[in-house]
Image (cartoon, helix red, strand yellow):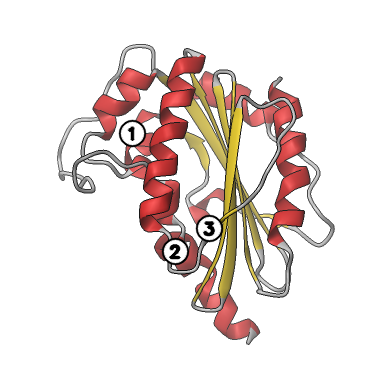
Amino acid sequence: MVVKRCALGLAALVVILSAMTACSSDNDAATNTPGSSAPTVPGAGTGLDAARLEALLITDVPGGYTVLADDVGDTGPSDLAKAIKDDGAADAEQQLAAEGFVAGYQRAWSNSSDDRLLIDLYEYREASGAAAWYARYLVSARKAQPPGTIDLTVSFPGSDQGAGFSGTAQGTTFVPLVAQVGTFVVRVTSYGSEEVDHQALATPIMDDQISRVT
């Protein structure tokens, strides 16, 4: 069973969660064009912005979890180009420009059973832009949910709004939680064994992360 779930570790992130962590528009998913120039959006972030966000990330996670190298799960700093790729919408560049994307940072942890935690922290120029991304995310996540996925009852003190989902696919249970906190968006995803209470695991991490940006 562990071997099966280890094989599903990155597959779950790519197949099960990628659509739920992308944002949708009225268009189909975007495709990258080889040789195209890097996108530019006035006011979009730099490496300095991402470094500042990294300093805001939580440092305490449940016992037994260790941080994963950025090349394992394509984590680390998110500039505009990476944000567009992760967004997934055909008009992602236009949407992110309208929302006022500044920068992002992602970090992942795993334990010996290959259960994983993923944190995404994104910043926008205005709270209205963060709220717009949050709304797009909810539309996309609900469209991409496997059958049986449920909306969770959540409360994140210090946030402007928050939501969460719980579902299972291919023997992997996943719980993404998301919150808008002023100009920031925080997303905490716990996934892996069906025996783990992923909501109970992810909620205090969300609360900790929110406290670091308020």
Q: Residue drawn at (54%, 59%), measured in percent from left and top?
A: 150
Task: Choose the circle earlier in sequence order: 1 or 3.
Answer: 3
Amino acid at circle 3: Val
The C terminus sits in image quarter: top right
Along the horizontal axis of the image, is 110 left or right of 101?
right
Q: Is residue 124 visible?
A: yes
State how far apart marks 2 and 1 are (Cα).
22 Å
The N terminus sits in image quarter: bottom right
Q: Indicate the position of residue 170 as horizontal and vertical percent values.
A: 49, 78
Q: Quadrant of residue 166?
A: bottom right
State how far apart marks 2 and 3 are (Cα).
17 Å
Q: Nearer the viewer, residue 149 or 94?
A: 149
Amino acid at circle 1: Ala
Amino acid at circle 2: Ile
Q: Which mark is residue 202?
A: none
Q: Which residue is mark 3?
A: 72
Along the horizontal axis of the image, is 168 left or right of 19?
right
> Quick one: SS at disc 3?
helix
Q: Which mark is residue 16?
A: 2
Task: Choose the circle earlier in sequence order: 2 or 1.
Answer: 2
Task: Choose the circle earlier in sequence order: 2 or 3.
Answer: 2
Q: Which residue is mark 1?
A: 81
Q: Residue drawn at (31%, 42%), measured in percent from left and top?
A: 24
**Number of the front mark, 2 or 3:** 2
Q: Is residue 175 above or below residue 114?
A: above
Q: Is residue 98 above or below residue 76?
A: above
State how far apart marks 1 and 3 are (Cα).
19 Å
